[in-house]
Amino acid sequence: MHRPPPRLQPPAALPEFGGRPAPGVPDPERVDPAVFGVLLRRHGWQRRGGAAGIYGRWTPPAADPAARTGTSLLVPESRAFPDCTDLLEEALAALARGALPCAREVLHGLNVPSDEIRWERQNPQIVRIPGRSPRALAVEDHLRAAAHSLLLAGALAARSTAGYYGARHRRQAERDLDGVVAGPSSDGGRLTAYLPVAGGRGTLTRLHHALHAAREAVDYRRTTGGMEAFDAAVQAGVSRELSDALIELVSGSEGARIALAWAPAAGAPAGCAARPEPVEFSPGDLPALREASARYTRDEPSVPVQVTGTVVRMRRTTPAAGGSVRLQVLSGADVPQVRMALDERAYRIAGHAHLAGVPIRVTGLLQRRGGFRSVAEIGDVRAVPLDEAQRDRLIKSMDESLDPSDVLSADD
């Protein structure tokens, strides 16, 4: 039976353009006319003439109300045009005044060179109700949550290679997505996200390879009945988290399509096609994806660790006995906190360390079960002495790095 991965926090939504200040007008002296033209075409603008090799006249997408008002932009094709800067300044100002979604997307791409990922989800027909129905809003929220899960799987794969991450690297991967913004969703069926080239390219490059590897593995499973391709796909970035994100994206739909486009100012990353082929998944792929998710969870091994951390919680049912302890991890494991069951002697050591304000060091196995958030087969447990300067630095680092969303749920 397929079970969804444990969540460390409520589902995150990709921040929209609408929740951020409008993109500023780029400096026309710094705008590359060729990049400008590529972005206009990518976001649905149509070239309607102009002098070939000199400038082009661009109109908004046909479906946009502005297309019926005679709105157009004159954009030079290169810096060789004598009035290039003046034309660019007028075109950029017109985009900023228009406040159209397709205009904001172009301005964002010029201000912050960004790679793009687009999701198209074929939803069953939604009855249109004025003011947007709760069902339509739920479909849009579903798409945004699935898109975030897919990007998070790519960010995790960019951090390390694993079939199942659980809580490992989760906090760092979420931070890697801080610069991502999304455009408006169209009826809950289409969504585009923008990842800055500076800092976000590793995530999308890894996701590009992982999506194609997942598609090939699903095809192999459906053709031959074998799961070997999913084992090999781990090296390309496929994981339980990616499988679950694709399941989330496709479930309840008639199919989904994912397309990537590289920032024209930066070009394609090494090892990637200049124009990547879109990847599609259908409801018929769900059994293979669910089987892969369960396989990755089952096969991922527990990890030997030596964890250093500060005691943040202790509990035992009777005096003079062992109990459970929770540590905020300082080093030794790629998770924010771990819990463990200690015998009476180790529990006493942890208690003394907590009262003295010093960390403890524990050896054991970081357990796959539960998402790598508990340590079992405990070996050595000892306090780590600190001098005053070290203790002050420790307290300061904890105050600066502690994120409330990283706190684990209560012990069962």
Image (cartoon, helix red, strand yellow):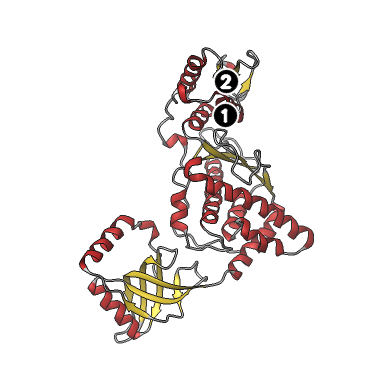
User: On residue 160, which mark appears?
Assistant: none
Q: Residue at x 65, y 39 (%)?
A: 274
Mark 2: amino acid:
Ser
Dot 1: element: helix
Residue 169, image x and y in percent?
47, 59
Mark 1: amino acid:
Leu
Q: For the view shown, which residue lies furthest in the left direction?
A: 388
Question: Is 393 situated left or right of 11 in this image?
Answer: left
Residue 142 visible in rendering: no
Q: Residue at x 51, y 40 (%)?
A: 197
Residue 405, image x and y in percent?
39, 57
Q: Residue at x 61, y 57 (%)?
A: 238
* Label 2 sits on residue: 78
Please say if 132 is above or below 73.
Answer: below
Question: Is 14 situated left or right of 308 in this image?
Answer: right
Please say if 290 is above or below 249.
Answer: below
Quadrant of the rendering where the C terminus is positioned: bottom left
Please identify the quarter of the rendering in which residue 126 is found.
top right
Dot 2: element: loop
Please identify the quarter of the rendering in which residue 276 is found.
top right
Which one is earlier in the sequence, the residue at label 2 or at label 1? 1
Question: Is 282 situated left or right of 198 in this image?
Answer: right
Please say if 66 is above or below 329.
Answer: above
* Label 1 sits on residue: 39
Between 308 and 46, the one lying in front of the other is: 308
Quadrant of the rendering where the N terminus is positioned: bottom right
- Within 10 Å of disc 2 (Cα), the crowding (few <14, some 14-19, many 20+) is some
Q: Quote the CA–CA distance across marks 2 and 1.
A: 15 Å
Between 14 and 200, the one lying in front of the other is: 200
Query: Which mark's residue is nearer the viewer, 2 or 1?
Result: 2
